[in-house]
Image: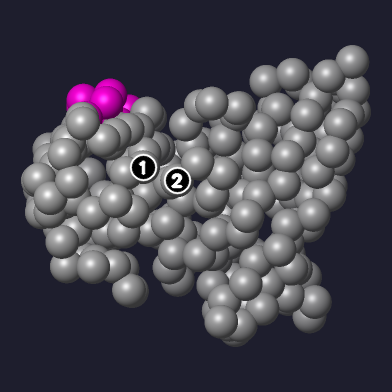
């Protein structure tokens, strides 16, 4: 059974940093691209970043480019999102998702999400 | 950047009836279109990809059609568990973009 478990969310002040983690199980982790998708309270979905199975290719939404860094440790089956210079508009539930194969494909499995709140 | 527009914003349907949801892309995305279902407090679930291919375990009452810029998700006979918000997503180009969602509510 595919499982994705996010952690690392919480309350942070504007300008602060946070690192999200997502531990994957139930599939061959390095064979799949992975994504982070966020959802602001009461709003729709936004693809934040994606990374290829090897980690050699990454993509970012313009809204986070230069502030967020996606990475993965295939030896630990873990996906990360380092978030710096956080803003109030980054407040959202952040979902880790497995992509259907390659980077840029739809996400077929999702974690339950971790809430990030940026507020003073 | 491709913009996805869904209509209507809210669809009121009685159980057992058909629901038809629309999604339009601001430029051609071929068949690189996915549909997701999201219930309150839950993560999205992939329903359809490639515009018309059902994901694993998705009931046959869900069907997708379209190509280019116009797409449709049809739920042939709504069940109680189908009342939710539905999002379309283009994956033809990065950044992948979602529509704003259509809420299917009980009439």
How many numbered marks, from 0 up?
2
Label 2, label 1: how far apart the Cα atoms are: 5 Å
Q: Is residue A70 above or below residue A100?
A: above
* Residue A26 located left or right of residue B31: right
- The answer for which chain carries disc 1 is B
Q: Is residue B88 left or right of residue A56?
A: left
Q: Nearer the viewer, residue A88 or A81?
A: A88
Residue B29, how many percent across, how many down?
Answer: 22, 44
Residue drawn at (15%, 61%), measured in percent from left and top?
B61
The residue drawn where x is 78% and y is 80% is: A75
Question: B70 or B13, which lies in front?
Answer: B13
Q: Position of residue B42 (x, y in %)?
A: 54, 49
What type of secondary structure mainly makes up the magenta span? strand
Asked if labels 1 and 2 touch by Cβ distance under 8 angstroms, the answer is yes
Residue B79, position as x, y percentages in the image:
23, 54
Judging by the rendered image, the residue that carries numbered circle 2 is B39
Q: Residue B106 at what x, y percent from top left?
A: 26, 35
Q: Nearer the viewer, residue B61 or B49?
A: B61
Q: Is residue A37 magenta?
A: no
Which residue is painted at 69% across and 27% down in the image?
A90
The residue labelled by disc 1 is B84
**What span is colored magenta in the figure?**
B2-11
């Amino acid at each position: 059974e595919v499982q994705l478990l996010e952690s690392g969310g919480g309350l942070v002040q504007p300008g602060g940093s946070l690192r999200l983690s997502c531990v994957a199980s139930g599939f061959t982790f390095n064979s799949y691209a992975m994504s982070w998708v966020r959802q602001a309270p009461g709003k729709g979905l936004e693809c934040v970043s994606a990374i290829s199975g090897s980690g050699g290719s990454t993509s970012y939404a313009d809204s986070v480019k230069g502030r967020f860094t996606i990475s993965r440790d295939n030896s630990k089956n873990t996906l990360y999102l380092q978030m710096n210079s956080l803003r109030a508009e980054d407040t959202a539930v952040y979902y880790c998702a497995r992509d259907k194969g390659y980077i840029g494909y739809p996400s077929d499995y999702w974690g339950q999400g971790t809430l990030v709140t940026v507020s003073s | 950047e491709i913009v996805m527009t869904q209509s209507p914003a809210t669809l009121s349907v009685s159980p057992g009836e058909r629901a038809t949801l629309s999604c339009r892309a601001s430029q051609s995305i071929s068949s690189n279109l996915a549909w997701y279902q999201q219930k309150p407090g839950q993560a999205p679930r992939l329903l359809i990809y490639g515009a018309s291919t059902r994901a694993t375990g998705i009931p046959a009452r869900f069907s997708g059609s379209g190509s280019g810029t116009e797409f449709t998700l049809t739920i042939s006979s709504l069940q109680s568990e189908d009342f939710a918000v539905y999002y379309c997503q283009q994956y033809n180009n990065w950044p992948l973009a979602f529509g704003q969602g259509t809420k299917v509510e009980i009439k």
